[in-house]
Image (cartoon, coloured by chain):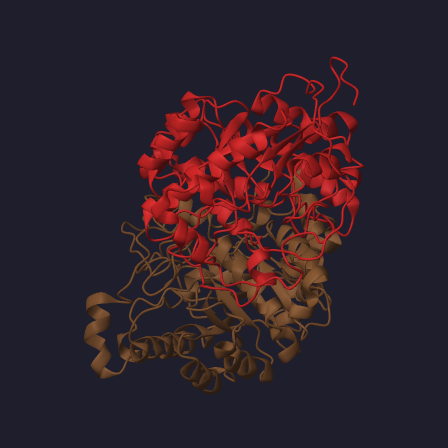
Chain colours: A brown, B red
Amino acid sequence: MDAGPGRPLTVDADVHQSLPDLTPHLPRHWRERWAQTGLGVGTGYHNPRGVLRQDTLPPDGGPPASDPLFLLSDHLDRYAIDYAVLTGPFVLPLGHDPDYLDAVARAVNDATAAGWLGVSRRFRGSVLVNADDPEAAVAEIERCGDRESVVQVLMATTTREPCGRRRYHPIYRAAAERGLPVALHPGAEGAGGAAPPTPVGYPSRYLEWHSLLPLTAMAQLASLLCEGVFEAFPDLRVVLVEGGVSWLPSLLWRLDKNYKALRDTTPWLRRLPSEYVAEHVRLTSQPIEEPPHPQQLEQVLAMVDAGRTLMFSSDYPHWDNDNPEVLFRRVDPAVRARIMGGTAAELYGLDGPPPPEQLPPHRSGGAADVLQPTGYHE
Amino acid sequence: MDAGPGRPLTVDADVHQSLPDLTPHLPRHWRERWAQTGLGVGTGYHNPRGVLRQDTLPPDGGPPASDPLFLLSDHLDRYAIDYAVLTGPFVLPLGHDPDYLDAVARAVNDATAAGWLGVSRRFRGSVLVNADDPEAAVAEIERCGDRESVVQVLMATTTREPCGRRRYHPIYRAAAERGLPVALHPGAEGAGGAAPPTPVGYPSRYLEWHSLLPLTAMAQLASLLCEGVFEAFPDLRVVLVEGGVSWLPSLLWRLDKNYKALRDTTPWLRRLPSEYVAEHVRLTSQPIEEPPHPQQLEQVLAMVDAGRTLMFSSDYPHWDNDNPEVLFRRVDPAVRARIMGGTAAELYGLDGPPPPEQLPPHRSGGAADVLQPTGYHE
């Protein structure tokens, strides 16, 4: 890897490490529950492809993305990715017992610190929080937010109320005070105590459910903007992970237009909704939309000011993983460099290429026989 | 008006006639309820601008759009609109007593026939149905669908389940058998028994609620496509009224991509989702998105194949009414002619300009003092 100064970085903003055994990190009284039911609520949607790439099983066993050394070789080295932002094996759905979900969040964060962030500085971590219990979420940000290699707070895109509402503000305050962006990641849409994943109820199948996941990101972005979250927390940055990209112009045009007519109903706002997005919001790219005509994607990237707002992500090792070698090939090289790492490096404070590391010997080939599902289903 | 053969028609696909007094058209036992509570459920969102243009009050009294002769002069003549498709004073929200809503639908349809469709052939009517009671909706289509000047079935975009599901199929069968498109119109989002208008619950204010209305249209389109409604009813046409336009490419790109991976889960589909849209789905234009750069709207219109899918609408007399004189001015004239009327004329079977009519004398100036709300809030 070329480590010369000024070399453009490549940063993958959405990589899912697996944590097959959370048990040692859970309090004794939750271990049996975790072993028996895991998160305990599901979305009810089934992807017959599975949700994990069948070619990513580590040669030494375990489910995909459970071996940090293999992930380094199989994904980061293979595609010359400098850093991977780890987004964990799942986000927390809206379950019913906040204490249990709070404990699972702590276990995920401790398992990630022990098993991943300590292995390589090329891994950057998220503080998973149970946003449905804001007080506990703040405590978790205080507990883990200053840890080595932690770069953001991570919560489910699905919340019980629109996420701009006041009950969630303590989370944003705690994150902004530490310079940590708050990332929203799908996967909990329609699960547990969540509202139906569409305004007309529950889609019948995974194809429809997955295609409509952007609805949740759209609703949350509108809430953050209209509730004035970015006025209340001027240092806050929000990352919409895996929520789609090409809906953004449509929503912002509509919000800007309506804001011009109705701004007296949101007097706490001082700029157009789209202006807050340019400064405060970033989106990850996977699964990138694939228009029939490549120039249409270029047009959309210009509409979203992709050089400023968009960050490459692969979603490794998930089923619809985007391959960085074929992404954004027609895009202006300077814009592409921003997408592939420049914007993420700024957002996450990555000042240069990772220094050389001494890693233990490991097998870099891939082979395996059994796929195990993780908690993620998108 | 030039009535020469071959003249391009201008058709307004969304005009809201007011029906201030439904009472004579309601059975005696519902009249008191209507007088006391009207539809009885609201969305809970307030637009301080009001929802009706303050300059459209008829000079002879009554609320905006309550005088068909004044509407002809104030809107159709003023903008050289040949035909207006009437979409009524409201769509039916998800209330609790189906019998009451069924009766209101019948009253709206009878009042429209008596007070509007009989006045001028330039008005074309919708059969309002309570989609939540499909059997009654079918009966209403049978009762009114063959009436003079009726051109479509109209239901709320908001339904209790995604509208592609089987319980709604009898409505589509009855409409398709008569060659009537089914129009979905917003206004009931989050009201009564509806699911929350976003996957994360209820927005706090009208600005946010109104900006997110496209979510409902997106979910319904995905449901119609994924459930195979257009395979089951090859003659069915669906009109998404007032649901936004520029989100369509994003949703179809995502649906097409996912369909390629998961088509075995919807074996009843034989084409890409986007191909069904091109043949079976039309969108109305108001409120048209207003990008910061005009060429971005042109790009979006190309992405949605606007010459095939998009139909001009004004939403007269609502607050955010689009003025046809300033719409689509940069668009290729042939495409613009399709948008402004060609596509609607085909869809609704309008074979040529309306013949000259003898209308009773009426005042065409405008003036008034009091605005009365209608059932529509979008």
x and y, in percent, of residue B313 in the image: 65, 38
Would you say B365 lies left or right of A216 here? right
Residue A194 vertical position relative to residue B135 in the rendered view, above or below: below
Count the marks: how many? Answer: 0
x and y, in percent, of residue A24 in the image: 27, 78
Q: Is residue A47 visible?
A: no
Closer-to-camera residue (B76/B343): B76
Would you say B163 lies left or right of A328 here? left
Q: Which quadrant of the structure image shows residue B5?
A: top right
Q: Which quadrant of the structure image shows residue B266?
A: top left
Closer-to-camera residue (B264/B335): B335
Closer-to-camera residue (A156/A224): A224
Closer-to-camera residue (B50/B263): B50
Residue shown at 73% from the left, 67% from the top: A6
Q: Is residue B183 visible?
A: yes
Residue shown at 44% from the left, 39% from the top: B25
x and y, in percent, of residue A271 in the image: 73, 68
Residue shown at 55% from the left, 47% from the top: B20
Residue B93 vertical position relative to residue B331 in the rendered view, above or below: below
Residue shown at 54% from the left, 52% from the top: B213
x and y, in percent, of residue B290 in the image: 72, 49
Would you say A308 lies left or right of A86 here? right
The N terminus of chain B: image quadrant: top right
